[in-house]
Each structure stands twice: as structure tokens, then as C-alpha cells.
Image (spheres, helix red, strand yellow):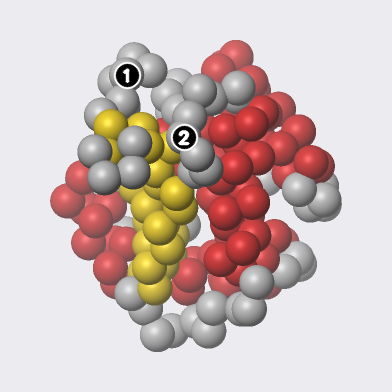
């Protein structure tokens, strides 16, 4: 049984590069493998624009502004509901602003693919229960994992990210 990564494009602002969907699937699989997740898992990834992600950010986090990515974990303490049709554990939803990802890729001087892979890996760790909101050791551990996984994907960090 393999993992299911459902990808939907709900924006027209940024052209989705060919191969990006494959890269996202590879990124999701790499995180699950790195974390020794007992799968199979199901993840939904949606591409939106800044206006749509600002609305979600306001609705769920009371921050009425665009952000790059939002994670909506479905699991609680490592327990996940099973999708009866495919037997997959439902990890949750990842929503990526392609508009913001493009802005950040330009800002950091790397490809849109690299940026979206980073956002996917970051968000996948959230779906698995990692958090960086309080900073400290947990944020450092999350960043170390992101780095290790991106190196596995052949996308080592070229610049230092700041949250």
C-alpha cells in the first residue's frame, strides 16, 4: 500500500511548473519515511492565492493576512482516522499560497520548486505533530529535520530561513 497525496490547484495567479506535483509527492513520502511513519497515509495539498490563504489565516488563526502555508492536522497524539476506501491514515490538509511561494523564492533567490518542497516538508512535520510556535528546542529539532529531509530530496538549504 502506498501513500496517497491528493493535489488540487485552486489558483490561477502562478503557473504550476511541470514536475511540481511529483516533487510534492516525493517530499511527503520522504518525511513519512524519515519519521518512520507506519502508513499508508493520505495527505491533501491545495494551491491557493494570497487572497484565499489570507481568508483561511484569518478564519483559523485570527491573522487577517496572507501567509505561505497552513497546515490542518487531523491526527491527535499520533492517532489518525482511517479512510475506509483506501485504508490510509488521514494526516490532514496542507494549503500553499503559490503567490507567496513565488515571492519567497524570488526573495531567497531559489526556484519555486525548492520553495514549495520546503513548505511541503515543513507542513508535513506539522501534520505529524511537530510545532515551532514556542521556539526553543522544538523549533530547532523541526528545522534540523527539515534540513535532513531536503538534503535527501537533493535540495539542500542555500540560505538561512527565518520564521
Question: At 57% across and 54% down in the image, what residue appears?
Answer: 25
Q: Secondary structure at mark 1?
A: loop
Residue identified by numbered label 2: 40
| Other-residue count near label 1 (Cα within 10 Å), few / some / many at <14 / 14–19 / ≥20 | few
| Front: mark 2 or 1 | 2
Q: Position of residue 2 (x, y in %)?
A: 52, 43
Quarter of the rendering occupied by the C terminus: top right
User: Residue 17's image quarter?
Assistant: bottom right
Can residue 30 be spotted in the picture? yes
Question: At 42% across and 63% down in the image, what residue appears?
Answer: 7
Pick whichever of labels 2 and 1 is earlier in the sequence.
Answer: 2
Q: Report the side of 23 relative to 5 (left or right).
A: right
Can residue 92 be spotted in the picture? no
Q: Position of residue 82 (x, y in %)?
A: 28, 32
Tag 2–tag 1 contact (CB < 8 Å): no
Residue identified by numbered label 1: 79
Question: At 53% across and 84% down in the image, what residue appears?
Answer: 15
Question: At 31% across and 26% down in the image, what residue appears?
Answer: 80
Q: On screen, 31 above or below 80?
A: below
**In whole angstroms, how far apart are the C-alphas of marks 2 and 1?**
13 Å
User: Residue 49's image quarter?
Assistant: bottom left
Q: Secondary structure at mark 2?
A: loop
Looking at the image, which is closer to me, 132 or 90? 90
Amino acid at each position: 500500500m502506498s501513500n496517497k497525496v491528493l493535489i488540487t490547484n485552486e489558483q490561477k495567479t502562478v503557473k504550476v511548473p511541470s514536475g511540481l506535483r511529483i516533487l510534492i509527492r516525493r517530499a511527503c513520502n520522504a518525511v513519512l519515511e524519515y519519521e518512520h511513519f507506519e502508513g499508508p497515509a493520505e495527505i491533501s495539498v491545495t494551491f491557493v492565492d494570497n487572497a484565499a490563504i489570507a481568508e483561511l489565516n484569518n478564519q483559523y488563526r485570527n491573522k487577517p493576512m496572507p501567509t505561505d502555508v497552513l497546515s490542518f492536522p487531523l491526527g491527535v497524539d499520533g492517532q489518525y482516522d482511517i479512510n475506509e476506501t483506501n485504508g490510509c491514515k488521514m494526516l490532514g490538509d496542507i494549503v500553499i499560497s503559490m503567490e507567496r511561494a513565488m515571492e519567497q523564492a524570488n526573495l531567497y533567490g531559489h526556484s519555486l520548486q525548492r520553495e514549495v518542497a520546503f513548505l511541503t516538508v515543513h507542513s508535513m512535520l506539522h501534520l505529524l505533530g511537530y510545532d515551532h510556535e514556542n521556539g526553543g528546542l522544538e523549533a530547532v529539532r523541526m528545522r534540523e529535520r527539515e534540513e535532513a529531509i531536503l538534503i535527501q530530496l537533493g535540495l539542500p538549504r542555500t540560505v538561512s530561513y527565518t520564521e
